[in-house]
Image: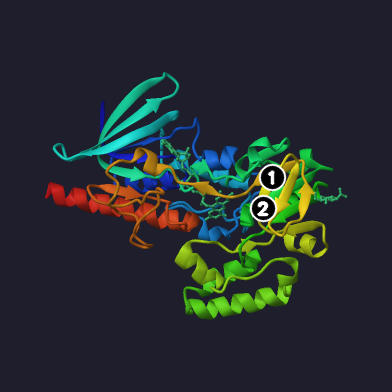
């Protein structure tokens, strides 16, 4: 049994940022991570051509800037380097291969009791912590919807987190399911590697350019969101034209408001729209069922595919191990309270990186949490 002041669960950007902010106040903490490295999502579960979607000024963690010569849109490898440097700078020492399995609040001792598995030794480790920070991510487990017949599909079925590049799909008929940033970019990557690519776009999306999103985020500091939204939608229309004839419609809510109200991001076009317009990438509607290689769509078209890539997002898994967290998280392991009041629960419980606000949201969560822990500790000692 190890007694610690703060236990942080997860050594992704959110856990690392929280650790750095705590160390600025010399508050002792321990940080545990189920994988054998920090930021495993970026190291092991992201495709090769991935760059940060947002400009670098919106993607910094607290207390450390990107090098001045860093490109505006940071490639994956550079982001991983930044995180390595971050870990070194703040001397963060995660306990790797340590997976938290349960945590309960001990009302008598007034602290959190956490049970984890040490996967290298196959033993159980226990922590007692005054404060508990959930930083296990919104992307903890893959989300793959079930379609009748999917289990018997004879081709490759993968989730976007296992997708690296389109190289091995050249000449194949591939269906991408999901039209978020990952799905749209993977479709582009497949098509440019010579795969015969289709993409399922079920719901309305805002297609934007990365420059427009950068402009929008900058203007949002000064102008009302609905005005910024109007500008962005107008500019996007000038750039992309009317995409409804290609099966892409816009949500009623503007892109900035949509992000702020629901956490849903606009899609930042990397060239996919151009290929859709040329008919190189085919847009499909909802899937109805699958039979052998044949996918039957709701519009009753049937087509044969060699592989399906599910870019259908992720789930939080914090609800599976966090007991007594009802003050903060719902049954899906996501915050009950809306941003910006989502990060604090009762009894010294916090969460970082669960409000669908990307790295900028992570940075504010980490600072808020460290400040709050500091003030609680100051008030206890005075
Ligand atoms: C493809 C992709 C691109 C993105 N691009 C951007 C972008 O450009 N800009 C931006 O701002 N945001 C982006 N995001 C969103 C977000 O910033 C990242 O997902 C970021 O990595 C989230 O950090 P995190 O620390 O909250 O979660 P994660 O990076 O998922 O880290 C959580 C860590 O917790 C560990 N963990 C989970 N459960 C346990 C457990 N029970 N015990 C121990 N450890 C556990 C996991 O192994 C993981 O290492 C992107 C997300 C994805 C998926
Ligand atoms: C591309 O894939 C679609 C869907 O499976 C199929 O209908 C079409 O014939 C394929 N085209 C070629 C050239 O293989």
Residue named by callout 1? 290
Relative image position of residue 250 (x, y in whole percent): 62, 71
Mark 1–mark 2 Cα distance, whole angstroms, equals: 8 Å
Q: Residue at x 24, y 51 (%)?
A: 346
Establish if 347 lies above or below 342. Answer: above
Q: Could you say which is closer to the camera, residue 166 or residue 28?
A: 166
Q: Residue furthest left?
A: 382
Please state the total of marks drawn on the protein image.
2
Q: Is residue 13 visible?
A: yes
Q: Residue at x 64, y 79 (%)?
A: 234
Q: Is residue 243 visible?
A: no
Q: Secondary structure at mark 1?
A: strand
Left or right: residue 45 compared with residue 118: right
Q: Could you say which is closer to the camera, residue 244 or residue 21?
A: 244
Relative image position of residue 190 (x, y in whole percent): 76, 48
Q: Are marks 1 and 2 in contact (CB under 8 Å)?
A: yes
Q: Which mark is residue 287?
A: 2
């Amino acid at each position: 049994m190890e007694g610690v002041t703060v236990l942080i669960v997860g050594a992704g950007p959110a856990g690392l940022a929280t650790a750095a902010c705590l160390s600025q106040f010399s508050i002792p903490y321990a940080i545990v991570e189920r994988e054998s490295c920090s930021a495993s999502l970026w190291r092991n579960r992201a495709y090769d051509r991935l760059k940060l979607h947002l400009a670098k000024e919106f993607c910094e963690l607290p207390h450390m800037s990107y090098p001045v010569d860093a490109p505006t849109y940071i490639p994956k490898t550079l982001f991983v380097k930044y995180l390595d440097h971050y870990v070194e700078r703040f001397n963060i020492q995660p306990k790797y291969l340590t997976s938290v399995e349960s945590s309960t609040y001990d009302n008598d001792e007034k602290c959190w009791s956490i049970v984890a598995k040490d996967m290298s030794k196959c033993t159980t480790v226990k922590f007692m912590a005054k404060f508990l920070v959930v930083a296990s991510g919104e992307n903890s487990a893959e989300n793959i919807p079930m379609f009748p017949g999917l289990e018997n599909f004879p081709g490759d079925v993968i989730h976007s987190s296992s997708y690296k590049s389109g190289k091995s799909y050249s000449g194949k008929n591939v269906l991408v399911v999901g039209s978020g940033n990952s799905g749209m970019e993977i479709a582009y990557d497949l098509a440019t590697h010579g795969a015969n690519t289709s993409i399922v776009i079920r719901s309305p999306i805002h297609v934007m350019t990365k420059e427009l999103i950068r402009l929008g985020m900058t203007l949002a500091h000064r102008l009302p969101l609905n005005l910024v939204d109007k500008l962005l939608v107008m500019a996007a229309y000038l750039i992309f034209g009317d995409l409804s004839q290609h099966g892409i419609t816009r949500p009623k809510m503007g892109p900035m408001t949509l992000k702020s109200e629901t956490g849903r991001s606009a899609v930042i076009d990397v060239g996919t729209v151009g290929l859709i317009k040329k008919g190189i990438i085919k847009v499909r509607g909802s899937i109805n069922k699958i039979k052998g290689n044949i996918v039957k769509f709701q519009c009753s078209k049937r087509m044969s595919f060699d592989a399906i890539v599910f870019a259908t997002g992720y789930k939080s898994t914090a609800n599976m191990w966090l007991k007594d967290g009802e003050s903060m998280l719902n049954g899906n392991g996501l915050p009950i309270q809306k941003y910006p009041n989502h990060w604090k629960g009762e009894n010294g419980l916090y969460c970082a990186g669960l409000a669908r606000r990307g790295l900028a949201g992570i940075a504010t969560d980490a600072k808020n949490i460290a400040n709050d822990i500091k003030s609680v500790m100051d008030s206890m000692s005075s």
